[in-house]
Amino acid sequence: MDSAGEPLCSPPGQLVMRRTSRSALRDSAPSASYQGVGSSTRLSVETSPDREQEVERLYRTEGGRLWRAVMAYCGNPEVASDAVSEAFAQVLARGAAVRDPRSWLWRSTFRIAAGELKKGRRAIDSPSDLTYEMPEPISDVLRALRALSPKQRAAVILHDYADLATNDVARIMGVSQATVRVHVSQGRRRLRRLLEERDA
Amino acid sequence: MPSKVERLDVIDELATPDLWPDIRQREPSGEPEGPGQLLPARRLVAAIVALSVAAAGSLVAVRAFTGDEPNRPPTAPGAARIVFSGGGGDAHADLFSMNPDGSDVRQLTDTPGSEEQPAPSPDGSRLAFAVREPGDPTSYVIGAMDADGANRGEIAGTRLEPRNPVGDPAWSPDGSEIAFAAYGDGGGIYIAGVSGGRPRRLTSAGPPTIHVDSEPVWSPNGDAIAFIRWFIGDSDEPPAFEILEVSPSGGHATLIDRFPAPTQGSPDDNGEVRGLSWSPDGSQLAFATEGAILTIDADGGQPRELVSCEELGCDRGTDVFTDSTTWSFDGRRIAFTAWVNVSSARADPPVIYIATVSGDPATVTSTDVGGLFPAWQPVPAESEPSPSSSPPTILDFEPAPGWHVVTTDPSLVGSLGAQAWASNVPFTEDEESVGESNSFPDGWPDKTEEALPPDGIILVASYSIDSRNSLPPGRSFPERVLPLTIDDRPSTAYEGQDPDRALSVVNATVNGRYVSVRIVFGTGDPGPELVGEAQAELGRLIVAPPPETVSALDDFGLRMDLPDTWHGILFRWAVGEPTIHAATVPITDLYDGSSAREGLGPEDLFLVLSENHASAIHYEPVSLPVVIRPEDACPTCEILDNGTSPPPGHALFYRSLAAVGRQFDLFVEFGTSAPSAEQLARVNEVLATLEIDPPDNLPPPAESPLVAADAAVSVDLAAGWIAKDDPVPSSSAPHVVAAYGTWDFPTGGNCGPEPALGDLPTDGALVWVAEYADPGYAVTSTPLVPGSRSISRRRRLDGSAPPPRHRGCTCSVSPAASSRSTSRSVPMRPRRRSGSRAASSRAFGPSRRPECQRPADQGEPTSRWVREVGLRLRLAAERLGPVDPQAPKRVNAGSQYMLAKARPPIRSERQKSRSLRQGHSDGAVDGRRGSSEVGHIGQQHLTVDHGEGAGGAEPVATPSVLATPDRHDPRTAPCA
């Protein structure tokens, strides 16, 4: 019984724990990625073909909805495209350092778009600025969304359109879950009223 | 909360560009990462790297979590842990806990749903948390479970009608209630009883007052609840965040402080106040806002900045999101979550930090563990060793999600040895209740095993030996360190094993303790994944630290001084009696010392002194010092009846001794066949140092509830038969318990029934009952006495044939004789005998193979036979005289254990589960656990000898009571 045969399996890995451990990030990221710290504006992580395939798959499954969500959020297709492209490009560049690309992409895309809006670089002042052609029902909804505060808008879009959980929305928005719920609640109420007004 | 606006779905109809070509070409802009603008997360990494060479700044990782230390001793007394929700941003958050330094991270839940905001009960034994079921984003309720993840349920009172999302649970200091926040139209702060009942509402949110209440926290004395109110603003007042206090019984909420909130609609409303917690002394509140951690007196006043946003990195062009403060119980540290660089595309997951409150300025360290909602958790009382009341748990498994663990009641460990069971299916209720049923050596989750699904796994870990001497490595118990690994493939090849229950066995000496783990799979062919799962759980085995070892032989009320050149160990099997092994050669195993004995040179010797609680044997009263005399030589003796007489060229001496109210077997084996007087004197010098304490602190000898000591073996004899009870009182193997003959046979002698057999008349028959450690050995293929003929040496008492594989050992039985002998059964009542301790010397080890004529390929020949005979005898005994249910089911430290030890890990079909579970501990049969006679029964053996020409005059031992039909066809008798 105590034969010293080959173990059937390696000692238990701590994958579970690594999910919460930043050290896992260090473990998994090539050390080269840190040599660039302080000296480069780019991370020097090579993008492997596998990684690119994986990211492309993610783009094909998630990119469209992400783009539409951020488009609904910022109202500007250019900003939306830029944010989505930048976020995906970052994921490609960061390689394995991004452990949960999907969450990361949602967070980053919205943050980039929010940053653009905040900077006012490409903010849209009125719905008439919309050059993007879209069917009227959609533009109605987008216009109504634009009447919400950015936080309400983000919360409603992420929670109700993108079907993200409150905790995910909270992480994307950088607020507590309680705040998300409030934003969602108020945003819904306001959105409904706006749409009803418009229909009337 | 208003329901979702369905029209949002039209967004799906937006024409969406394909950006992939652009993405592939795109040069990510990234933020400049000049030296002065290190992002905190990266700076953190750099700090960790630099830690060994330079004084780190205020923001250093105190410990990089290493995942390769899964096994730690149970948390030290008085220690606390931090529970938190993690999941790395996954949609389904799970709960974890860790030591405050970030070490020993354990996952507590693993569900497709989401568990967040853990709130430990005041004693740390339970956790309340916010739950969201998968696929239903609004299904927030408050769940609760044990600190290890077991006994999960829902706090009924938190399910509001109409349905509102709820969260932010907080346990009241008396543990009876949980405060929580509800959102939406029925929102507000509520309190629900832990054990049910309708919740009561303390505050209400929403119209007409436009505010949202969240994060209730109890004051340490339980007479106030602080919470955060987000005043959303109206035409009269700008929005603000407020910290308020309300009595748990309701009433008006009083303001502690108010913070103006950024105007609604600002893209950045990080003025939010969140993560409220009360200091353990009730004097202060801590909270998070704008990337910093602040404290404020509980009665108001000016907030103080404990941790600044800059300290966390927001002076470097990043922003910081802080949340979820929680105080350590000494009030000296505050754990919180910080998410640095939160607005950047580079945001990393939130990490739990620790701020030390005492000292100025506060020191901030990162635990290096990602997570949200940290909460300081008292280590549950039951896992705190309390030296006065309960001994430490010797074996345990670290809690893991989906696994259930049962451990021996610590109060039983001292007398019974310890077990720890783990299974990925729940144990049945009765098997979970702590008691002897899950104690060593009898404990085995029979019912759970029976119902084990194909993907089910059970681990049974047993601790078996008690010694403060350092244990020699045993042949089957190599020294190992945790985590143990499954070295042998799960097998169903054990004899008689259920083909649907593969078994792996791991034996190891861990922390100076012999530990045996049996791993049962619910399938006969577990895949690598299942084996991996079992391996992972095996990796969570906890073995108590080594006992404080002593080199002197001084324990259990026994002392013996050894010369420097001798080796010795004094130990006690967990369910056994103290034993001394002493030798002039190194002792390398504890089974029977055989590996040491084999290496004895002519001048060497090996001494075994083993206490025996058996009461039915005649022990020779001696006064100390005891000596070995030339007349004690017993060539046919076996050390502890282990089935092996000394090899040619060795001499074995045996004495039984009763001294100071205790009984011992003393064996001395010499590496020469004729030890000199000097050699004997040498031994006697050592024996002269033997001191024996009176047995007052030892358990009294257990009386068998089955038979009185004088009952021995009894048979309803037909006319013409003579019974002579215990004719060979002090013999060694074979221990004749009783003999029945057709003539007035002589008794006595030292080594067996030879005197009687020598006089066996041609028309006579002798039935004798003896105990063997190993019938395969003890019953030889040659008649004991020339001219006599053994007609049944290995009869099963129900009349069926011995297993074919044993034929090689029974070939002296002729078919004709067999046909007679097997037609009857001899009712017999077993009694406890000293010989029952026989096999202890082989404890855990591979049994010595008997020297009988047995084809080499027949595998394990003997112990199964012992078992089966034992079983039959036991069944017979039950028919003869059922155990008095009122009789105390005591565990004799001796005999029961012995059979267990005698048994190598093979199993017959009907004993599958028991042998699986016991392997080395087979004392329990058919639920008769804890009774002392079983093992000893198992070693009794029935032999019938006939005189020459007995063919026409059958022995007439009457099958009076044991009326088992003879299912055996003599024409197919073995060894034809």
Image (cartoon, rainbow, N blue to C red):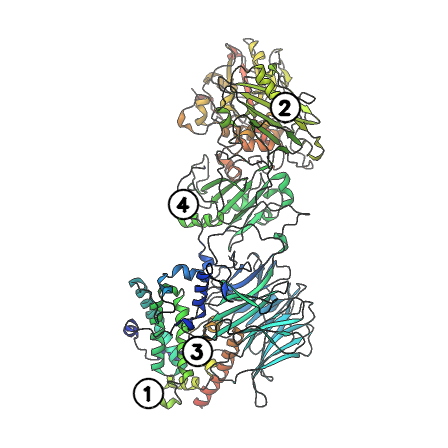
Which kind of residue does numbered mark 3 sit on?
A: Ile
- Which residue position holds label 3? A157
- Which residue position holds label 2? B687
Marks 3 and 4, the one that precedes in the sequence: 4
Kindly identify which chain the residue marked by label 3 belongs to: A
Q: Give the image location of residue B855, x and y in percent.
A: 40, 24
Which kind of residue does numbered mark 2 sit on?
A: Leu
Which kind of residue does numbered mark 4 sit on?
A: Leu
Q: CA distance from mark 1 to mark 2?
A: 105 Å
Q: CA distance from mark 3 to mark 1?
A: 21 Å
Q: Give the image location of residue B715, x and y in percent.
A: 62, 21
Between label 2 and label 3, give the one nearer the viewer: 2
Between label 3 and label 4, give the one nearer the viewer: 4
**Label number found at residue A131:** 1
Eyeballing the image, is B140 above or below B440?
Answer: below
Is label 1 on the same chain as label 2? no
In this view of the protein, which residue sits in the foreground, A65 or B946? A65
Report crowding for label 2: few under 14, some 14 to 19, many 20 or more residues within 10 A (C-alpha): many
- Which residue position holds label 4? A8
Between label 1 and label 2, give the one nearer the viewer: 2
Please tell me whether mark 1 sits on a helix, a strand or a loop: loop
**B251 relative position to B400: left or right:** right
Report crowding for label 3: few under 14, some 14 to 19, many 20 or more residues within 10 A (C-alpha): many
Please tell me whether mark 4 sits on a helix, a strand or a loop: loop
Kindly identify which chain the residue marked by label 4 belongs to: A
Q: CA distance from mark 4 to mark 1?
A: 63 Å
Q: CA distance from mark 3 to mark 4?
A: 49 Å
Is label 4 on the same chain as label 2? no
Please tell me whether mark 2 sits on a helix, a strand or a loop: helix
